[in-house]
Amino acid sequence: MWQKKLGSERVIFGFSGGVDSTTLSAILTPVLKDQLLAITIDGGQLREGELDQIQEHATFAGVNLKVVDAHKEFNVVMANVIDAEQKRKCFKKVYASLFVQAAKDFNASVVLQGTLATDRIESGVTGGAVIKSHHNVGLDMGDLVQLHPIDHLFKYEIRGLAKEILLPKSVCDRQPFPGPGLFLRVIGIPATPEKLDLVRWADARVREILVRHGVYDQISQLVVAYFGVNVVGIKGDARVYGGTIAVRAIKTLDFMTAQGVHFSDNIEKEICATLTRHSEIVQVGFYPADKPPATTEFE
């Protein structure tokens, strides 16, 4: 079907290494072969070790991958942005421009996205209220044809499909991560490279603790964010001011509604002790609110 629909057209594909993009590319690559090029944007928004995993998942899918280094572009556009929705819009604009350039370089006329039904619903394109905009919905890419082959499916359906085509556990069980990534997890202040490094470090340490305690695979999504409002604390014998790391985990099937997760006292104490060793982290808070009234992300 896709070969007939696309003919000899070259296609680029937004590839995050998540279950959606990996599953879709694993299905399409045997059909499109060298007509398809996966594109990953690295603008400083990725978590620790994530680029390695993205490249590994591209290998599982058999798709050719191009990583675009866009640190400079995003550092400029995010330099003074604090508002969450404005961050999403800035990310979306740069993301679209980078894909237009990637399409030109590859001589492609079609852009594929692993957009899900939840992305469309939350973006308001199905007629409801806008919960938050998504970087892969409503993109301005000029004359490029945009296709969203799985935008009628939910996350649990894609996971089921990934298992059916025998993708590895690291793909099938991979937790979602927003397109703007860590830009949305620096809250109340601009997401500078230094603050991105800080929240990246904290996120990795929390994940390590949850994996060690056998908890990480029991949750649907982990959010670790940096609140940039100074609070007072004590390090050694000194009074200090610094930020707060907020830790949130949920359990859900469709990601439209979710239950907040409460960690054990031992896990919370270990997370607090580990993170507050960092000179810029004074406090750690845990936020097990359900969705709704909360959303998964803080921003």
Image (cartoon, rainbow, N blue to C red):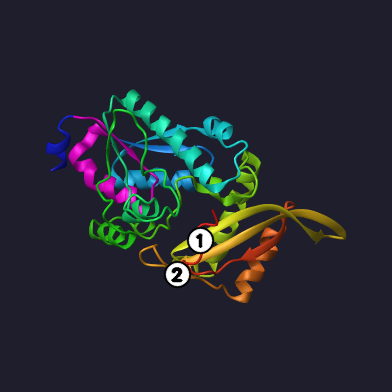
Q: Amino acid at mark 2?
A: Gln
Give x and y (percent) for residue 164. Answer: 23, 60
Tag 1's secondary structure?
Answer: strand
Tag 2's secondary structure?
Answer: helix
Q: Quadrant of residue 131?
A: bottom left
Give x and y (percent) for residue 174. Answer: 40, 57
Give x and y (percent) for residue 157. Answer: 28, 61
In the image, the segment drawn in magenta is: 9-36
Give x and y (percent) for residue 40. Answer: 41, 38
Label 1 to label 2: alpha-carbon separation: 11 Å
Residue pointed to by mark 1? 222
Does the CB distance between marks 1 and 2 fall below 8 Å?
Answer: no
| Residue plotted at (58% across, 31% down) | 76
| Residue plotted at (52% across, 30% down) | 73
32 falls in the magenta region: yes
User: Overall secondary structure of the magenta stretch?
Assistant: helix
Judged left or right of residue 256, residue 77 is right
Residue pointed to by mark 2? 218
Q: Amino acid at mark 1?
A: Leu
